[in-house]
Amino acid sequence: MKGQSRFAILDDRGLLAVGGDDRIPFLQGLVSNDMKTVGLVRAVYAALLTPQGKYLHDFFVLAHDGALLLDCERARLKDLKKRLAIYKLRSRVTLEDVSDNFAVAALFGDNWRDGFGLGDAAGAAAAFAGGVVCVDPRLADAGGRAVLPRGTAEAVLCQAGLEKTAAADYDRLRLSLGLPDGSRDLVVDKSILLESGFDELNGVDWKKGCYMGQELTARTKYRGLVKKRLVPVVLDGPPPQPGTPVMLAGREAGEMRSAAATEKGGIGLALLRLESLTEADRAGGGLQAGGIGVTPAKAPWMAF
């Protein structure tokens, strides 16, 4: 995904504004990353878990106009708002869906940072055109994200020198880098963060103290309990449906998650057993999903 700097409006993303004097301590006790580090010059990536440490929601957190904006899955925003509201109690916190007021855009391609005043570090943020722009806090190679007033978002990004493109182009970049896309790749009430790279992708702060699901997440890391990983794969044909079993020598090695077609077949993400990855590597291949050849393409950022 080199070449012209581009942007794609992500219509599947919503924005939940968490306002009020207690917004930072309120989220601090609930989510996986350190909310005290979020500010005008830094955005973070975080998740909300069940008390048992299973995935519920993931989102980007950006500071804007005295509130914390949660860039989340639009189709699941109501559920996120409802879950957070349970814990409000007497906290001075407001929860407002501002998806109709702001648009989320992915920024990528060569030199996309030009004109935004951003550094190279993942999560670097700055105010821009009535909103905020940041380097992707997971991985700088993924480009950036912008939250901008919906009515002017496209115009100001074009004025900044970026060319509009389809969200599908960004999705292929995401898949090639091995980045999960919310509940498309993580199973609600089932997945654990470390299977999906949240440690390497700056989604967990190990020093912040307690948050919901922290005990299981820490135990999984320090006892080496991760047995599966979500990895990018290259497909020899049309992408199989999400959930299609990935087989190796007649045994189930994992399952497909999100994917996209390419000129040569497809790319996608698959949750694979680490032992099966090792076995397939030794055998020089052999993984298949729905009769389609599956070749793991471990991303450089992955630590396993």
Image (spheres, rainbow, N blue to C red):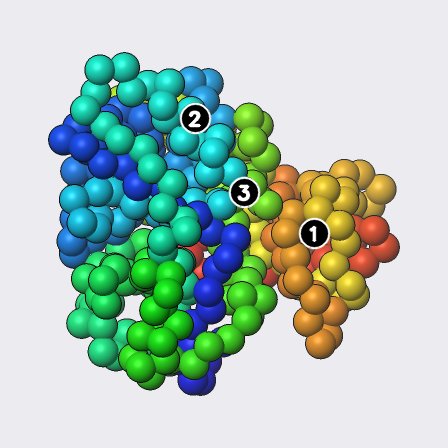
Which residue is tagged 1? 280
Residue 252: where, in percent of width, then height?
Answer: 76, 38
Q: CA distance from mark 1 to mark 3?
A: 37 Å
Determine whether the residue tagged by mark 2 lies in a helix, strand or loop: helix
Residue drawn where x is 79% and y is 65% of the image: 237
| Depth order, front residue of 36/234 | 36
Task: Give the answer, above or below, for where 53 lies relative to 35.
Answer: above
Task: Give the answer, above or below, for where 168 lies relative to 280.
Answer: below
Residue 82, labelled with which disc?
Answer: 2
Residue drawn where x is 46% and y is 77% of the image: 164
- How crowded pointer 1 is (Cα within 10 Å; few <14, some 14-19, many 20+) is rated as some
Q: Is residue 133 visible?
A: yes
| Depth order, front residue of 78/285 | 78
Please tell me which of labels 2 and 3 falls first in the chain: 3
Residue 127: where, in percent of width, then height?
Answer: 19, 62
Kindly identify the amino acid type of the residue bearing the numbered disc 2: Lys
Residue 75, labelled with which disc?
Answer: 3
Residue drawn where x is 46% and y is 18% of the image: 52
In which quarter of the view is residue 293 placed?
Answer: bottom right
Residue 40: where, in percent of width, then height?
Answer: 16, 53
| Depth order, front residue of 297/266 | 266
Determine whether the residue tagged by mark 3 lies in a helix, strand or loop: helix
- How crowded pointer 2 is (Cα within 10 Å; few <14, some 14-19, many 20+) is rated as few
Q: List the single residue furthest toward the top.
A: 89
